[in-house]
Amino acid sequence: MSTLSRRWARALFEVAASQSAVDAVAADLAGIDGVLADPELREFIARPELQATARQVIQQRLGEGRHALVRNLLGVLAERRRLGLLLELRLAFDELVLSSRGEVRGLVETAHALGEAERERLAATAAKLSGRVVHLAVQVKPELIGGIRLRVGNTLWDGSVAQALDELRERLLEAPLARAAH
């Protein structure tokens, strides 16, 4: 996520918070993000060379029925040829919303799919480790062989078999070789 998208999200969040509109703005950004799920549209709006008329049409269509703050944001982004920031803005805004509530996103990478009970236990463990409520996403990565890798914020706990094998390989490479007696 770019620094620029974080700055815009911060500004939007502060204004939305001052107007008690954080939830409405978050919902509108989610709606826009849903519209931008189309890869062709994502590629199209990311172009800074879009003509003014195209930017206006996009701004108006995306802004229909949205909160005034979101419509204003779309207008400024279109005017400054920054509509491409919409591709990251929701994620940055959502992080600020979670942070304001003392919550954080986390990612569990595992070699095999997890059941609901395992997910709940991991979420509880992640909450204990981080001191915050953790919203976990799960990715299956067979290359881990076994175990899990848990990332919460900037902290990584790696209990995967692949990591253990990498550490073993490093220790073996660093170990002095003993000469065999002839």
Image (cartoon, rainbow, N blue to C red):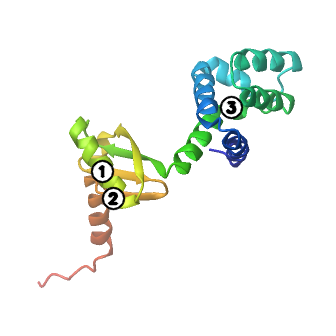
Give the residue pinned by disc 1. 124
Give the residue type at disc 3. Answer: Leu
Q: Position of residue 139 (x, y in %)?
A: 36, 38
Give the residue type at disc 2. Answer: Lys
Left/right of residue 31 with respect to residue 130 in the rendered view: right
Give the label, 3 or 1, closer to the camera. 1
Give the label, 3 or 2, closer to the camera. 2
Depicted 166 relative to depicted 150: above or below: below
Depicted 139 relative to depicted 162: above or below: above
Q: Nearer the viewer, residue 181 or 161?
A: 161
Give the residue type at disc 1. Answer: Ala
Element class at badge 1: helix
Q: Nearer the viewer, residue 30 or 138?
A: 30
Depicted 59 relative to depicted 138: above or below: above
Give the residue pinned by disc 2. 128
Give the residue pinned by disc 3. 86
